[in-house]
Each structure stands twice: as structure tokens, then as C-alpha cells.
């Protein structure tokens, strides 16, 4: 019952105990004793699963974000790999800390606000500091860089030391005496106390802990039957790319099969706001000292429908189908252009995407954007759906959503709100719950009772009714939801085109399909690190393949399709097969050259698609792809924000509570097995495995006395020696 990935039921545990007893194993603990021991261990060095009453009326359980972050700092396997400062690596880009989102765009109060010199002196941003040459500077950012503006060795005195010596030693005016009638009012810090974290940290280091926050509507069943669970997880963004996608570094926050994602996000944001306001105290096992942690959300990950929900976007079926920019599709009443062709069967074009176990990702034909014939063109069009439109902004979207809510407070505006959503492409599913309550409050009323019912409903509304995503400091859900390459490329373009090959290009040609199976099975993929391909499976079940299957298909397609498909289709496959490894580039040596090459390859791929058939552009993912170069510049290589590592299953009992507790237990076991430290009873923190009791009895922590956290440490009444002598308490023995 302590294995992280093997949660046994009560019946299974009873069976194991019976097997042990049948094999004459002595001194067995009962299941009840093990459960009590488990609870004691969880109180001592585990994390809490907190119950929340959601704003929309659903109950869910959320594991403590602050305690998990504190565990990461006390885990030697993780702490030695973490980075807390952005890094200016020039044109080189391989980690999130080197990309512009963390390096250049994050607000000052979201970054690590100080650094500690080798002498142990703490220097904070927005505080004056004195250099050895007698000059004074106030730092605005702390970054790792080769060509620095102020070197650590140039620093002489920090703000507290300078305040003491300014007038007495250096004949300088008092640093805290800022005259507002002469100078601009200083609002970044307290002129007397300095940076607020300086006082709050009490001499300890302050570090920022950025995370990748992920949510998806994964299935709670191991079987094929769909059992929708909205699940939140995170990984530390300060980890190297090679570590961030490992299961070991993926942390579970919450899940529910009834609570909506934004409803659970409300609880996560509440914990996040508390951590950003007061900090999270943790033990740094690398520095062997306490530190104060500031949590930060670097980006929100998920498939396209989930990211649209984060951004309060109406979705991919809307006329404004992009969450990132204002690109517009055709109105339903617009006529089709003369260049429209329909040479792809409906079952291929309008298949249900498997991104989230539903068909939410495809758009209806009459909502698709304009289709042109680009045959003979050398470049894609410079405007329209294949180009980036005016970018959406957080401030503009919040203003429009507030306007929608204001209209909901007026009688009879239900249809007007729907029109506003359509015309803006914005729909806040969190606020929609409260707007629907306002509209429904007077539906069955007549006369003056309608306004009275509406006024009463308004009075009962909570103070904050917009999505909690807008409360996340430093995060813009439009620009900080990067293109998810698994669902856009592998489960998007590769899936569409592979199904087209099987169902359209080779339609009813069983002999050709058999030849394709043979070719797939005959290809030597050993150099790609892949097992031999199952040709029959890849062709017969082309609509039920996984991202791993499509990754293999994208690499071998040019070698097996050359005489199976028409030339325009084959050229499109060549362009896609060239684009895929470029997107999955783990390390970028020259960013500008890479972005330029990537943009050209994307344009060429879209041009090949257009020459083949413009009907593919009914899929909005072809537009979403054009935002990828900008997101790589802002967040790092696309592999950093891929989502293959995130998954969760349900035990089909009380999912939110039971799964939260199960993952909380897994966190504890992981922490102990990793030689993580914890604090208890005022004793010095150290790895449990290095204690004498830890090597013999996991149930014995701290002192030998029975405590509230240690209910299993008992004093024996008596003992029998090997000589069979009976020794009682208070008796005398010869040793």
C-alpha cells in the first residue's frame, strides 16, 4: 500500500496477508494498523488534501501547492537541478529560463527579487547598493549572463549597510528621505524598509518557483469507456528539459468528474495568491538553510479546447476561432467562393478529434474560413486565416467580459449577450454560471416582480464573478497558453493526412492497403529507436492510433507513400515530415536562424496543403500552427511545453477526494525514497534514511516517546531474554 503506482484495495491487502500467513510468515501487521501508520506518516512528512466548496456548487479536494513546492526544495534529487534565475544565453535556447517570457516579460515582482553573494550579503532589486568604485545603483533584474552590467564582485554595500553608513561614513543624504516635491514618487518599495521581501525573509534567501500548470479532461477509466475527469497537474519550470517531462517530476493537484476546470482553478489561484503575498517557507536541502519561495505560473498547458476555456475563448467552433488572435472565419450566411472544392469524404474531413476524447475540436463547414485555390502560387497569402491577426490582450478581454456581465444585470438581455459572445469570440464559462442565474431569476416572473427578482439575485452574487484565471499575476491566458504540438501536429495534421491516405487515397483498394501494411512492417526503424512497426494495426486502426504511432508515421511516410498517393499529397507529406523534426528540436543553437527556418517550413507546408486541397483549411489547427514560432521564442523549444507526460486514472469511488489522497501519499513515498528532508519536533532537518530509526523501523520518528504524530511508539511492560528470564520494568539486569 506504499507503492506510488500501485494502490491496492482493502480486499487485495487482506489477500496478501492471507498468503503471507499461509506461508507461515510471523509478526504481520493488520491492515488497520498499516492504515493508522500511513496516516501518522502522512501527518509527519506528507502533504494535505484540502476540501473546497466550489463557487459553482461542487465539492472538490486540492492537494497543498505550498507543501509540494516545499517538498521539492527539500528533495536532493530535485533541488540540485532547479534554477531560479532567468538566463541570458544569447542566441542559444534550450531551457525555459532562457526564453523571453521568463527573461524579459515577467514582471519584477514575479522574479527572484535578490541574490546572495559568496560573502552571504543579500542584495534586493529596487534597493540602492554601493559599488567598490563609489557609485550607486539600484538593480531591476537579477539574471545569469556572461556579459553583465554589474558583476557580483563589484558590490560593496547592500541597502541596510548603506543606510547605516551613508551619512556617517560617506557624507550622503539619508536614503529614505525622498522628497516628492522634487522627485517622482517612489512606489516600488518602502523607502525606509526597502523591498518588502527583504523584511519578510528575515535574512534568508528569497527565490521564485515558476511552474508549468496543466489541465485536461482525461478519462478516469483505464478501459476505453470515456469517464471525463478534469485534472490539474504541474511540473517545475526551473528543471532542465531532460527532467521536466519525467513522471517523477509531474505533480498532481486535483481532479473531479463534476467540478469544472475553472471552478477548481479558483482554489488553485487562492493558494497561489497566498504564496505570492506571504511566500512559502521551505528547507533548502542544497544550501542547508530555510528559504522563502514565491510561486509563479509560467504558462498554462492543455489541448486546444482546454486552452480556449482558460482564455475564456468561445472555442474552435466559433467565428473567431483562435484564442490567441482575432482571426475571423466565414459567417454562416456567406456564400462559398468559386474556388471551393470538396474532394475529401465527410467521414475524413469531419472526423471526431481524439484530443480530449470528444469531437469538440472540429468546426462545422459553414463556420470554416474562406477556402481559396493556391495552385501555382509560390507563397501563402499575406493575410487571412493563414497569418497571425491582431493579438488578443488580457486587459481588452477583461473589459469585454465585464461588459457582458453588466448587460446580464439588465432585464431581457439574454440574446444580446449571446450576440456579444459571437462577435468577440469570448465566453467565460465561470462567469456564465452567474449570468445564467441572473437571467433565470426572472424568467417565470411577471410585471414588477421581474426587476425585483433580478435585484435580489444581484445582491446574492459573490464579489468576484469573472474567471479566476484573470487573477493570476503576470499571466495572460491568450499569449501564455502555448501551442501544444502533440494535439496540433501529431494528433492533428499527421492524423488527418494518414486517415486520408487509408480512407480516401486507398479507398476500397484492398490490394494497395495490403501492400502498405507490408511496407510498414518491412521498414527498418532501429535507427529511430523504435520497435518494429505493426503494419496491420497502423492501417486497420488508423483512427485509433496514439501520438507515438503518428510520430513514427511522420518519419517514415516519405519512404513508403511515394507511389500510393498523388503527387500533391506526396509533396505535402514530404513538407510535413521535414517540419516535424524541426518542431521537436530539443536544443536551438541560433534562435533567429531557427525561427526563420521554422517559419519558412511552416509556410511551405501550408502552401503544399493549399496546392493539394484547400478543404483541409476547414481545420483551425492549420491556423494555430502559425503561432508556434512566437511561442518557441517566448517559452523555449516546443518539447518543453508538450503534454505527453500528464495522465491520471480514477478509482471510481469518490474521485476528487480519493485520488487527491492517493497522490498525496505518493508524494510522501517519493520524498522519503529520494532521501528528502522534513522538520519535526524542532530537531535538525536531515534525510530520514540517514537516521538510525529510519533504517530499522519506518514507524519510529523523532523521540522514543509516544506523541500525537507518533502514536505507534509504545513502552513495553516486560520482556523475555534469550535465556527465558522474565524482566519487568524497574528490575535489575546484568549486561
Image (cartoon, rainbow, N blue to C red):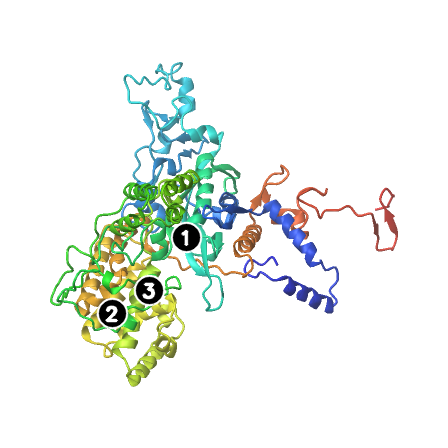
Q: Is residue 483 visible?
A: yes
How crowded pointer 3 is (Cα within 10 Å; few <14, some 14-19, many 20+) is rated as: many
Query: Above or below — where is 141 with respect to 588?
Result: above
How crowded pointer 2 is (Cα within 10 Å; few <14, some 14-19, many 20+) is rated as: many
In the picture, measured across the screen, residue 705 lies left or right of residue 655, that is right
Q: Secondary structure at mark 3?
A: helix
Which residue is most to the bottom? 511
Picture coordinates of residue 6, whole percent (x, y): 57, 61
In the picture, measured across the screen, residue 334 lies left or right of residue 700, that is left
Q: Nearer the viewer, residue 121 or 319?
A: 319
Quadrant in which the N terminus appears: bottom right
- Which of the 4 quarters of the picture holds residue 105? top left
In the picture, measured across the screen, residue 225 lies left or right of residue 344, that is right
Picture coordinates of residue 589, whole percent (x, y): 28, 52
Q: Nearer the viewer, residue 135 or 667?
A: 667
Picture coordinates of residue 30, whole percent (x, y): 71, 58
Q: CA distance from mark 1 to mark 3?
A: 19 Å
Earlier residue among tags 3 and 2? 3
What label sits on residue 490 in the rendered view?
3
The residue that mark 1 highlights is: 214
Query: Above or below — where is 176 with respect to 51?
Result: above
Earlier residue among tags 1 and 3? 1
Earlier residue among tags 2 and 1? 1
What label sits on residue 145 in the rendered view?
none
Q: CA distance from mark 3 to mark 2?
A: 13 Å
The residue that mark 2 highlights is: 573
Q: Secondary structure at mark 1?
A: strand
Amino acid at each position: 500500500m506504499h507503492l506510488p503506482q500501485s494502490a491496492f484495495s482493502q480486499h487485495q491487502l487482506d489477500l496478501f496477508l492471507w498468503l503471507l500467513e499461509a506461508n507461515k510468515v510471523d509478526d504481520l501487521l493488520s491492515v488497520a494498523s498499516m492504515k493508522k501508520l500511513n496516516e501518522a506518516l502522512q501527518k509527519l512528512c506528507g502533504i494535505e488534501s484540502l476540501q473546497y466548496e466550489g463557487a459553482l456548487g461542487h465539492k472538490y479536494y486540492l492537494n497543498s501547492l505550498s507543501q509540494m513546492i516545499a517538498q521539492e526544495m527539500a528533495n536532493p534529487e530535485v533541488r540540485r537541478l532547479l534554477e531560479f534565475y532567468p538566463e541570458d544565453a544569447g542566441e542559444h535556447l534550450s531551457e525555459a529560463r532562457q526564453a523571453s517570457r521568463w527573461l524579459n516579460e515577467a514582471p519584477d515582482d514575479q522574479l527572484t527579487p535578490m541574490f546572495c553573494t559568496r560573502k552571504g550579503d543579500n542584495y534586493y532589486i529596487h534597493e540602492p547598493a554601493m559599488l567598490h568604485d563609489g557609485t550607486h545603483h539600484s538593480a531591476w533584474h537579477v539574471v545569469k549572463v556572461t556579459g553583465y552590467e554589474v558583476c557580483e564582485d563589484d558590490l560593496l554595500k547592500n541597502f541596510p549597510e548603506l543606510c547605516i553608513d551613508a551619512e556617517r561614513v560617506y557624507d550622503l543624504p539619508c536614503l529614505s528621505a525622498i522628497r516628492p516635491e522634487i522627485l517622482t514618487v517612489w512606489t516600488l518599495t518602502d523607502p525606509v524598509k526597502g523591498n518588502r521581501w527583504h523584511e519578510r525573509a528575515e535574512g534568508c534567501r528569497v527565490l521564485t518557483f515558476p511552474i508549468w500548470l496543466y489541465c485536461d479532461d482525461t478519462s478516469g477509466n483505464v478501459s476505453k469507456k470515456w469517464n471525463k475527469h478534469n485534472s490539474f497537474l504541474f511540473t517545475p519550470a526551473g528543471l532542465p528539459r531532460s527532467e521536466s517531462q519525467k513522471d517523477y517530476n509531474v505533480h498532481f493537484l486535483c481532479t473531479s468528474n463534476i467540478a469544472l476546470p475553472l471552478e477548481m482553478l479558483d482554489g488553485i489561484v487562492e493558494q497561489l495568491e497566498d504564496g505570492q503575498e506571504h511566500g512559502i517557507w521551505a528547507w533548502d536541502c542544497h544550501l542547508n538553510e530555510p528559504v522563502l519561495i514565491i510561486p509563479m505560473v509560467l504558462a498554462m498547458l492543455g489541448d486546444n479546447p482546454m486552452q480556449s476555456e482558460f482564455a475564456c475563448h468561445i472555442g474552435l467552433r466559433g467565428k473567431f476561432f483562435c484564442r490567441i488572435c482575432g482571426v475571423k472565419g466565414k459567417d454562416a450566411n456567406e456564400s462559398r467562393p468559386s474556388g471551393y472544392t470538396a474532394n475529401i469524404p465527410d467521414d475524413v474531413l469531419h472526423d471526431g478529434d481524439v484530443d480530449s476524447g470528444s469531437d469538440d475540436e472540429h468546426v462545422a463547414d459553414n463556420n470554416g474560413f474562406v477556402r481559396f485555390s493556391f495552385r501555382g502560387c509560390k507563397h501563402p497569402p499575406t493575410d487571412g486565416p493563414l497569418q497571425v491577426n491582431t493579438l488578443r490582450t488580457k486587459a481588452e478581454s477583461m473589459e469585454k467580459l465585464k461588459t457582458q456581465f453588466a448587460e446580464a444585470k439588465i432585464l431581457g438581455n439574454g440574446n444580446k449577450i449571446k450576440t456579444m459572445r459571437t462577435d468577440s469570440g469570448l465566453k467565460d464559462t465561470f462567469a456564465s454560471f452567474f449570468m445564467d442565474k441572473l437571467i433565470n431569476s426572472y424568467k417565470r416572473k411577471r410585471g414588477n416582480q421581474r426587476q425585483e427578482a433580478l435585484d435580489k439575485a444581484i445582491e446574492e452574487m459573490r464579489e468576484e464573478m469573472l474567471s479566476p484565471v484573470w487573477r493570476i499575476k503576470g499571466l495572460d491566458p491568450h499569449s501564455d497558453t502555448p501551442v501544444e504540438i502533440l494535439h496540433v501536429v501529431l494528433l492533428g495534421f499527421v492524423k488527418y493526412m494518414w486517415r486520408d491516405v487509408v480512407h480516401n487515397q486507398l479507398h476500397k483498394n484492398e490490394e494497395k492497403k495490403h501492400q502498405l501494411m507490408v511496407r510498414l512492417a518491412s521498414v527498418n526503424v532501429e535507427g529511430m529507436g523504435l520497435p518494429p512497426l505493426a503494419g496491420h494495426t497502423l492501417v486497420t486502426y488508423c483512427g485509433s492510433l496514439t501520438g507515438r504511432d503518428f510520430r513514427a508515421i511522420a518519419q517514415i511516410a516519405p519512404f513508403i507513400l511515394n507511389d500510393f498517393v498523388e503527387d500533391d499529397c506526396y509533396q505535402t507529406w514530404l513538407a510535413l515530415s521535414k517540419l516535424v523534426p524541426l518542431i521537436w528540436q530539443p536544443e536551438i543553437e541560433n534562435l533567429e536562424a531557427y525561427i526563420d527556418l521554422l517559419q519558412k517550413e511552416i509556410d511551405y507546408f501550408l502552401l503544399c496543403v493549399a496546392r493539394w486541397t484547400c478543404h483541409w483549411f476547414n481545420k483551425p489547427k492549420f491556423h494555430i500552427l502559425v503561432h508556434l514560432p512566437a511561442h518557441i521564442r517566448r517559452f523555449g523549444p516546443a518539447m518543453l511545453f508538450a503534454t505527453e507526460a500528464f495522465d491520471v486514472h480514477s478509482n471510481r469511488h469518490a474521485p476528487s477526494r480519493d485520488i487527491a489522497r492517493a497522490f498525496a501519499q505518493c508524494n510522501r513515498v517519493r520524498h522519503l525514497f529520494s532521501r528528502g528532508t522534513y522538520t519535526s519536533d524542532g530537531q535538525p532537518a536531515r534525510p530520514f534514511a540517514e537516521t538510525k530509526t529510519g533504517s530499522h523501523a519506518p514507524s519510529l520518528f523523532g523521540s522514543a516517546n509516544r506523541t500525537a504524530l507518533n502514536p505507534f511508539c509504545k513502552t513495553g511492560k516486560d520482556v523475555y531474554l534469550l535465556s527465558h528470564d522474565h524482566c519487568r520494568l524497574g528490575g535489575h539486569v546484568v549486561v
